[in-house]
Amino acid sequence: MNDRLPHEKGFHISWDQIHRDSRALAWRLDKQGPDGGQWRAVVAITRGGLAPAMIIARELDIRVVDTISVKSYDNQTQAEAIVLKAPQAEIMGDDGEGILVIDDLVDTGKTLELVRKLFPKAHFATVYAKPMGRDMVDSFITEVSQDTWIFFPWDMALQYVEPYRGR
């Protein structure tokens, strides 16, 4: 049994690092879309996928950007994944073909499994991947161990800070 708290094996990501890694993911995805290499749209899984999706959409000159809101964490506790807000049906089509679905991290894969069931032909890309969820993602940049907690810059100050609205 591991009595380690999540922050004790932490991987701290700066704004510069998420920007560099998101650009690297964009370069990996460039000219890989099904329509002559082009992607029809980017769909960010909120909230973590928003910053990487913005960077990827800019780098690949994709103007159609939407979101899917999936809740699978309550602070640092993983829960059942549920869709709170779906992307526009006209953008996604029947199966998501030609769409880049972007998230910051695949952990256990539960979030991507849920979204993949909805849009099985979309291309799923994350900046970071853990082994349990790696099979759910088509493209990623950096793999970290399953027991590593990633601290993203939007969660951090000099120390972890609860969101303004609290719990």
Image (cartoon, rainbow, N blue to C red):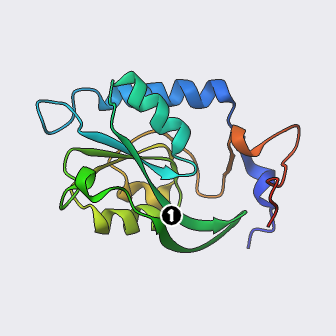
Residue 74: image x %, image y %? 69, 68
Q: Compare residues 130 and 31 and report the one nearer the observer.
A: 31
Q: Quadrant of residue 94?
A: bottom left
Callout count: 1
Q: Compare residues 70 and 130 and report the one nearer the observer.
A: 70
Q: Compare residues 38 and 137 and report the one nearer the observer.
A: 38
Location of mark 1 (residue): 70
Where the N terminus falls, by quadrant?
A: bottom right
Q: Taking 40 as reference, is 1 above or below it?
A: below
Q: Taking 89 as reference, is 31 above or below it?
A: above
Furthest residue toward bottom? 80
Residue 128: image x %, image y %? 52, 43
Q: Quadrant of residue 96?
A: bottom left
Crowd band around label 1 with a 10 angstrom C-alpha radius: few (<14), some (14–19), many (20+): many
Where the C terminus falls, by quadrant?
A: bottom right
Mark 1 residue type: Val
Q: Residue at x 78, y 42 (%)?
A: 156
Q: Residue at x 32, y 30 (%)?
A: 62
Q: Residue at x 57, y 48 (%)?
A: 48
Residue 17: image x %, image y %? 62, 27
Furthest residue toward left? 36
- Does residue 157 appear left or right of residue 137 in this picture? right
- Does residue 24 appear left or right of residue 62 in this picture? right
* Callout 1: SS: strand
Q: Compare residues 150 and 30 and report the one nearer the observer.
A: 30
- Does residue 166 appear left or right of residue 65 in this picture? right
Q: Residue at x 33, y 24 (%)?
A: 61
Residue 92: image x %, image y %? 25, 54
